Image (cartoon, rainbow, N blue to C red):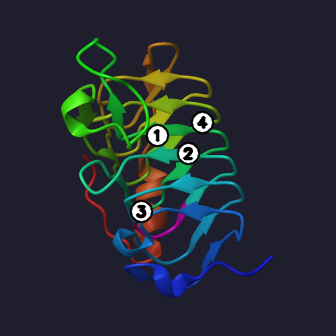
Amino acid sequence: MADFDYSSLKSVGTDVVISPNAEIRRPQIVSIGSHVAIDTACITTAAEIADYVHIGPYVTVIGGPKARLGMGHFTNLAAGCRVICGSDRFMGEGLIGPASIPDEFKDKLKLAPVILEDFANVGTNAVIMPGVTLAQGSVIGACSLVTHSTEPWTVYVGVPARPLKARSREKMLRYAAEMGYVIAAK
């Protein structure tokens, strides 16, 4: 299998490894920072990815130019996550499904970015819905469903995801600063 075509991306930093099995749709609007790994069978659309980011295997990001994924420094999407930046509303306002349905017959869409602020991380098989911001340092537990934005430095679990406990930040902020990333705590 051929290597991934990095030249198709809007921009790409150094030390970036993208699996040849990854599918990046609309690569011309995808920006990737440095020290990034995108694993096998990942499917993504419009994205802005900062430095030191890992997107695990079998992650799916659904969106487009008006519904993008933003990932800050030191963020992670673990294996099997689903990030939904754009979706039909399923309210009976039109036909649901393929893009080939004429616009006048389509269901209304919810198109909104999903943002992972610096140090936010998502556990295996979690689902993040449109318009959610995972605040700085927040963590989403495995198999959780996130329908609302989170508070900084908090661990969330469940369906729907609810706060479980606070997360320590001092060591992560210090390590990031030692690596040249001075990030103000929120």
Q: Identify the residue position indicated by label 1 in the image.
A: 83
Q: Identify the residue position indicated by label 4 in the image.
A: 123
| Gap in angstroms between the C-alphas marked 4 and 3 | 17 Å
What type is the residue that disc 1 sits on? Val
Residue 14 vertical placement versus 77 (above, below): below
Please report contact status of discs 1 and 4: CB closer than 8 Å, yes or no.
Answer: no
Q: Residues within 10 Å of mark 2 (few under 14, many from 20)?
A: many
| Gap in angstroms between the C-alphas marked 2 and 1 | 6 Å
Left/right placement of residue 69 relative to residue 25 reads left
Q: Position of residue 60 (x, y in %)?
A: 55, 45
Residue 116 vertical placement versus 166 (above, below): below
What type is the residue that disc 4 sits on? Gly
Q: Identify the residue position indicated by label 3 in the image.
A: 73
Per the rendering, the mark at residue 174 is: none
Q: Earlier in the sequence, mark 1 or mark 3?
A: 3
Magenta stretch, residue numbers: 49-53
Q: Secondary structure at mark 3?
A: loop
| Gap in angstroms between the C-alphas marked 1 and 4 | 12 Å
Q: Secondary structure at mark 4?
A: loop
Q: Identify the residue position indicated by label 2 in the image.
A: 60
